[in-house]
Image: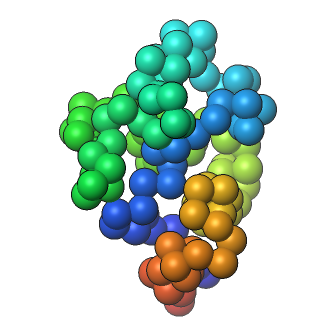
Amino acid sequence: MKSWKCIEKCGACCKFDLHNRDEIFKILSKDDIEQIKSMTAKDGWCKNLDRKNMRCLIYDERPYFCRVDIFSKNFKKYKKQGDKFLINCCKQHISDVYGKNSEMMSQYKKQTTINYI
């Protein structure tokens, strides 16, 4: 079984277009949507991302929707598929931001390990 893992200096989930994620409107409140909009720069990147080092500047205080371990539980697919759902989400974000055949995608695939249970 593959195991989900976030990779350092990626930040793909920190660049978003709410209109590319239709299901998100069913999960987030209007206040959450407004908070995301206020956190998003004109180029789509989160204002709280240190773009030079690709690290979150508010990591310990980040909103719940930026916490994969908490936010993912809101999705039916996560409840059914677990880490497979998270892996697919990351691949989608990485592909959208860096490209399907990018170095970042290669790194992600390498670091998504196989665990034997």
> Is 97 or 108 nearer to us in this picture?
97
Position of 93 with respect to 52 (left or right) is right
Q: Quadrant of the rendered structure where residue 61 is?
A: top left
* Residue 46: image location, x then y, percent: 42, 36
* Residue 54: image location, x then y, percent: 32, 55
Position of 69 with respect to 78 (left or right) is left
Give the quarter of the figure containing the N terminus.
Answer: bottom right
- In the orientation shown, which residue stands out farthest toward the right? 22
At a point 33% along the width and 42% down the height, the residue shown is 49
At a point 46% along the width and 39% down the height, the residue shown is 45
Please count the marks in the image: 0
- Using the rendered image of the protein, determine whether residue 104 is visible from the camera's viewpoint: yes
> Is 4 or 56 nearer to us in this picture?
56
- In the orientation shown, which residue stands out farthest toward the front? 43
> Is 29 or 74 nearer to us in this picture?
29
For residue 38, above or below residue 4? above
At a point 40% along the width and 68% down the height, the residue shown is 7
Position of 107 with respect to 23 (left or right) is left
* Residue 55: image location, x then y, percent: 28, 52
For residue 3, above or below residue 11? below
Position of 56 with respect to 44 (left or right) is left
For residue 86, above or below residue 4? above
At a point 73% along the width and 50% down the height, the residue shown is 77
- Using the rendered image of the protein, determine whether residue 64 is visible from the camera's viewpoint: no
Q: Quadrant of the rendered structure where residue 60 is?
A: top left
How did the renderer colour the structure?
rainbow
For residue 49, above or below residue 47? below
* Residue 110: image location, x then y, percent: 50, 86
